[in-house]
Image (cartoon, grey):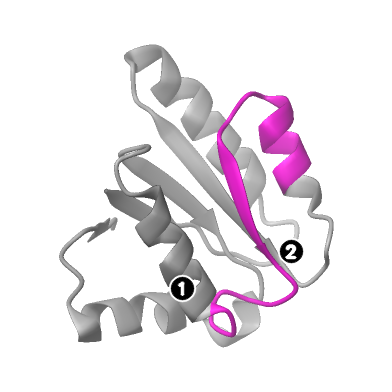
């Protein structure tokens, strides 16, 4: 399973970029899912992707770094469902992408590839 973390500041175009990539990948037969993340309970991006028919899961109520075990557990449950998952983290001011990917590299998980 490939995992791509798409980080950036609020309003930088993360959701738009992910939606555009999915729109381009799906006609090629690529199966892509999205994991959304935010501090709130009802995530707007989740509703947006689900409305477009994109398989979407969410980690709500905290950033991926603070909810790392929940994210890791969710990804393990999603193995085999879709070969590519795009994760859109919140909290860019503390480099969430680095804080999320570093523990995976340290524990050497063999069931996923972290995209460039």
Estimate the x, y position of residue 93 in percent, counting from the top left.
Answer: 63, 82
Q: Which residue is farthest top?
A: 27
Estimate the x, y position of residue 7 in percent, counting from the top left.
Answer: 54, 64
Residue 88, image quadrant: bottom right
Circles 1 and 2 in contact, beta carbons < 8 Å: no
Mark 1 or 2: the one toward you: 1
- Residue at 67% over, 56% down: 12
Q: Secondary structure at mark 2?
A: loop
Which of the two discs, 1 and 2, labels the residue nearer the N terminus?
2
Q: Relative to residue 93, is residue 83 drawn left or right?
A: left
Numbered mark located on residue 10 in the image: 2
Estimate the x, y position of residue 73 in percent, counting from the top left.
Answer: 44, 68
- Residue at 49% over, 68% down: 71
Foreground residue among 39 and 8: 39
**Residue 102 lies in the magenta-colored region:** no
**Residue 50 lies in the magenta-colored region:** yes
Residue 30, image quadrant: top left
- Residue at 67% over, 35% down: 49
C-alpha distance separating marks 1 and 2: 15 Å
Residue 116, image quadrant: bottom left
Residue under label 1: 97
Q: Secondary structure at mark 1?
A: helix
Q: Report the span colored magenta.
A: 46-67
């Amino acid at each position: 399973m490939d995992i791509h973390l798409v980080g950036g500041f609020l309003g930088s175009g993360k959701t738009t970029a992910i939606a555009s990539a999915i729109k381009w990948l799906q006609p090629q037969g690529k199966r892509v899912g999205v994991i959304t993340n935010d501090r709130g309970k009802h995530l707007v991006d989740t509703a947006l992707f689900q409305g477009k028919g994109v398989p979407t899961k969410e980690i709500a109520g905290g950033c991926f770094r603070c909810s790392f075990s929940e994210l890791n557990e969710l990804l393990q449950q999603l193995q085999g469902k879709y070969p590519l998952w795009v994760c859109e983290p919140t909290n860019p001011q503390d480099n969430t992408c680095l804080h999320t990917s570093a523990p995976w590299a340290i524990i050497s998980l063999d069931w996923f590839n972290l995209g460039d």
